[in-house]
Amino acid sequence: MSVAELKERHAAAIEAVNDLRERLKQRRQQLLDADVAGYARSLGRSQVTFGPTDLVCCRTLQGHTGKVYSLDWTPERDRIVSASQDGRLIVWNAQTSQKTHAIKLPCAWVMTCAFSPTGQSVACGGLDGMCSIFNLNSATDRDGNLPVSVTLNGHKGYVSCCQYVPDEDIHIITSSGDQTCVLWDITTGLRTTVFGGEFQSGHTADVLRYFSYGNRFGTGSDDGTCRLFDIRNGHQLQVYYQQHGDKEVPLVTSIAFSISGRLLFAGYSNGDCYVWDTLLARVVLNLGSVKNSHENRISCLGLSADGSSLCTGSWDTNLKIWAFGGHRKVI
């Protein structure tokens, strides 16, 4: 077979593959005849309702002197770690509001932090492009600072997020502005796997937060929307967007699901924190408009492992713990 014939067959195969891909895309679009909210309304599902005491601010954690950028809970839900651009990580006792550790960081421009599954160490990353690991049981140096136990260096851009692999203290995943995610072995400090590439998310701006829940995952974006996807087929199931008239659309900064997945908590750049009913795609509560709310952008939020408490962090330098009260049960 000549080179010309091989090229001709190759071109024909590419054309056939592209044709099949387009037909598959069209067929999938035909199957998307309804979103989650439309289907729920057709079944007569009622909206979740909140009373004035169903979700209240029970504690305000004060101690940072700069904008709070990230937070994370321990699996035992009794401690919180927060990262601020005052150049420190603070570990809090969530039940007493007391600080147990105040860690001076090698780089003040921190963007993310995470607790290990055992709660024995914390990680952080930021504009220095590195992920720093601190063992909370290590001895402090002469100046009273906790030394860095491990430094994970390999990204070519800032580290935007870090998260430990569930039930493991030795593996952590980082995402970066270099458009890659890396799985690290903390014991060796080496990269195990590098993930790269793009996927069609439906967003029209940077996707800043990702949160997985069973076979579904949610995203929050600079375009002001949260979106729900099915991880099995990549279909977009629902868009969560609140109209703001002629006002500038606030950015979504952080999201989290309730234990059942019925509620979606979303923080915004204008200080709002919406509680969405994921079935009906309606806002059932705005924590930004209730008593003792934050005075600036909601930069991060996270739900405790048992789903009983929500913690929010803000550019007003404070963190707030919100608890379900009244007749409301954890949902």
Image (spheres, helix red, strand yellow):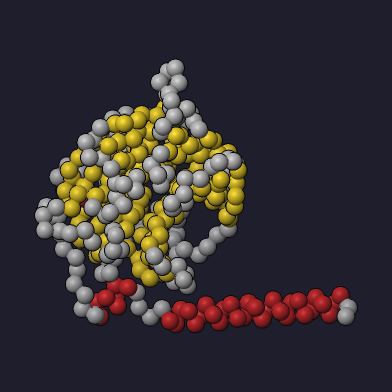
Instruction: Report if residue 244 is visible in the image.
Output: no
Q: Is residue 62 left or right of residue 231?
A: left
Going 43% across and 38% down the picture, which residue do you hit?
121
Going 30% across and 63% down the picture, which residue do you hit?
261
Q: Position of residue 35 (x, y in %)?
A: 34, 74
Going 63% across and 77% down the picture, which residue do you hit?
18
Q: Residue furthest right?
A: 2
Nearer to the camera, 227 or 81: 81
Q: Is residue 293 left or right of residue 182?
A: left
Instruction: Report if residue 49 is visible in the image.
Output: yes
Nearer to the camera, 248 or 237: 237
Q: Is residue 135 left or right of residue 262?
A: right
The quadrant holding residue 315 is: top left
Q: Position of residue 91 (x, y in %)?
A: 34, 35
The quadrant holding residue 279 is: bottom left
Going 60% across and 50% down the picture, which residue do you hit?
192
Q: Is residue 7 left or right of residue 120?
A: right
Q: Position of residue 311 (x, y in %)?
A: 27, 46
Q: Quadrant of the C terminus?
A: bottom left
Q: Position of residue 147 (x, y in %)?
A: 47, 27
